[in-house]
Each structure stands twice: as C-alpha cells, then as structure tokens.
Amino acid sequence: MAEVRAHSRHAARERRWRKALSAHGGEPALQIVDRRVPDAAPSKHGQGDQVSAVRVERAGRAPGCQSKQVAIELRVGGRSGHGARTVSAGSARLLSPVRLVGIVVVLLAAAAPGPAEASQLVARNTSSERLSVSREGKAVVTYRANGRLQHVFAWGAVNALMPSATRKQAEFQVDYSGGWKRFGQPLWKTLRNTCGKYAGPALPWVVASCTAPDGSHWALQRWRRSQANFALPPFKTGHGAWELRLSHWSGPVARLDVWLDWSYGGRWQHLFGRLSYRGLPVHGFTTTPAGDPLDSYGRVLYLDTLDSAYGSGWRRENGFVARRPDGTFCYGFVPHRIPSGETLPPGTGRRYQLSTSGPGVTPDISWEGDGLGEYDSEDVFHREHEARMNELQQLIVDGSESCHS
C-alpha cells in the first residue's frame, strides 16, 4: 500500500493515486460556510488550503508509496509528495487494528461532485455552544464568537453517500441569520427542541450532542483540524483555530483501522491502515497538484505526534489522503527539509493521533495509540511483528500500491 504522497497530480480516473499531504481538501460544505465564518478567509478548496503541503525536493520517493521511498527532502508548499515512512508497532497488542471512534456513511443528495464535504464547519474559535433540534430535523446551533451571540439554522442532510463520481455528497443547508434570510422570520426563537439524551457511539471533541425521536444523532464537535505540518508556526488563516463542526447521522459508524510497524529494515517507524464504512472503502477521486481533494468524497487524515523531536506535547506531523480505490493509507516518519533550509529529524513520538473529518455530514473521528521503540533485529517479537504487518499490508490493499516493508 503506497505511502502517502503529498501533492500529486491525480487524474480523475488515475488508478495509481498519489496522496496529498495538505489539509483536508475541498469540502464544499466547508467552503460555503467559510464565507460566513467571521474569523477566517474562505478557502478556495475548502479545508484543502489550510494545511501546508509537503513536497519532495529531489530524487527521493514521494510519500504516496513507501515502496518507492528513499531518503527524501521535503518542503512545505511544493508539488511532490511527502515520502512516508512506516511506523511500527512495538507490542503484541498492535497486531490487531485499533478501532476508531467512527464516521458514518449512508445516503443522500445527488449532483455533480464538487470540493470535498464532511461534518460541516459552522464557525471558528467559539464558546458557549448549544444545540437544539426540532421534530422535523431542523437544528439551531447557538454559540458565541467575536463577542457576539450567533444562532445558525441548519437542515436538510443526514449521513453520507458512498463514493460516487456522478453525484455530490450530502451537505446541510445553512442560514446564519437564524431563519430570517431563508424563511423571513427568526425561526431560532420558536424552534422547539425535541432532541433528547445522546445515545450514539462515543465520539471525540464533543461539546453538544443529542438523539432525535427518529433515532438519528446530532453532534457539535470542536477541534483544531487545520495546523501547519511539522510543528511549524501558523502561516495561513485558520491554522490553529478551533473549528466548530456539525454532524447528523444514523445507523452504524465507519471504521478507521490503524497499525504500526517499521520499514527499510527497521530504520523508520511506519503507520498504515484503512478508512472504511460497512466494509467498503472511503476515498475520493481527484486532488489538486498540492494533494487537496477536488471532489466531495476525498478525506484527509491528520497525523499528530506526542513528545517528539518537535518538542513536548502534541504537534502536527502531517496530513495525507485515504487512497482510491481501497481507502488505505501509509505514512513513514522520515527526516525532511523545510523552506528555511533546516533539516528536521523524523517526528517519531511517544504516541500518535490520527484524525479526520467524517464524510458527508457524519461526525469527525480520531484514533490514538502508542508509538514503537527502535527496531531490534535480534528481538524475536520485533521480527515476527514486522513479518505479520507486511503480510497484513498486502491483504488490505485492493488496487493501490503496497507500502514499503
């Protein structure tokens, strides 16, 4: 399974899909809302332009494919991909996939695909968040931002469609005037909340949630999705902002399976896995040269590292796309060069967190697990684990390239 290629030129029907490392690219829902979000400029491709893309400076292999990866020099904001290195798992527990609190995908909407959508961005840097939902499935999101109390009216979407090249993903209709603009009256004042105690799956970053009489779930999540790669200082509008995101879904949630091992004879740690829903892969169809999804199905996964060479605490390592056609991904921790000319060491950490926005209007999800120690070729467990992980990588790949072992 190819390691993540940051920036790559993906043809719409290109089978060997190189993965981008930028932000969660092109969410139409996000793009639409961005125009009204007070504290950030709208993104041309939705989430896509909020995280720096990484590019390979010379002959090293692009990130997409571990199998082609060699010593690489990466640069923020270029065209090539980030050479991903495999991260390994150092304990027997890592032999089984770690399940992620999940995404949900189902059906809705139709139209030509546009920039990728996900749980819908409502606002940034908010406080005092509240959620009310009527029996008819219309929601009022109340929050305070920029010194103002805001009431946002949202309706018209649930779950997500499976990847399709002919129809657009599900997205909410949104009225930032609380109903005045669309319906000619302040509906937020008269909406009667019928959404009860939340009875859905555990989710990260929840600030408000409930379960409606029809059994569907609603949630508001708040997290710092957009950050500069390699723990660099913020350099784009939105970097480091706390995003408030709304979701509405029913039924089973999707899965993010993650494993760890080593690559290149144990030289580099490596992380790989698969993003899926109901046994089917979650993926997009095209990206920009910088690797941002251009359709409404692409998902970018954001990788953070704890107590690494970047410093103590959690720091953003990189971002990459779940690959078509199998929803797989792999990423290796390798040295990289930044625009200043400085070469940064691998962002290997004590723990890792992998997060992504849910497809359609489903909730955002996150996985967290321990990192691996250095590979010991004389350690029987290390050798057995590496062999099993290499076999597993071959098993989960269905149409994309394998990671470098």
Image (cartoon, helix red, strand yellow):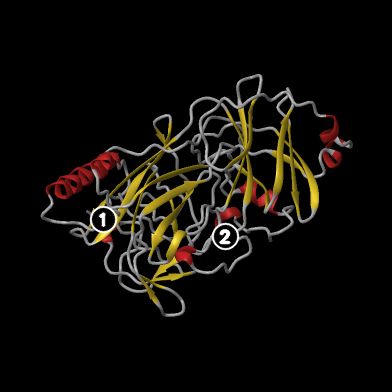
Residue 373's label in the rendered image is 1
Q: Nearer the viewer, mark 2 or mark 1?
A: 1
Q: Secondary structure at mark 1?
A: loop
* Residue 7 can be seen in this image: no
Give amino acid for label 1: Gly
Q: Secondary structure at mark 2?
A: helix
Q: Residues within 10 Å of mark 1 (few under 14, many from 20)?
A: some
Could you tell me if the residues under marks 2 and 1 are in contact, i.e. CB atoms within 8 Å?
A: no
Res 109 quadrant in image: top right
Q: Position of residue 302 (x, y in %)?
A: 47, 53
Tell me what residue is drawn at x 58 percent, y 54 percent. Answer: 47
Tell me what residue is drawn at x 47 percent, y 69 percent. Answer: 76
Q: Is residue 95 left or right of residue 360?
A: left
| 352 is higher (above) or lower (below) than 200 | below
> According to the image, label 2 marks what residue?
50
Q: Position of residue 245 (x, y in %)?
A: 63, 44
Q: Position of residue 240 (x, y in %)?
A: 58, 60
Give amino acid for label 2: Gln
Res 3 quadrant in image: bottom left
Towards the viewer: 136 or 343: 343
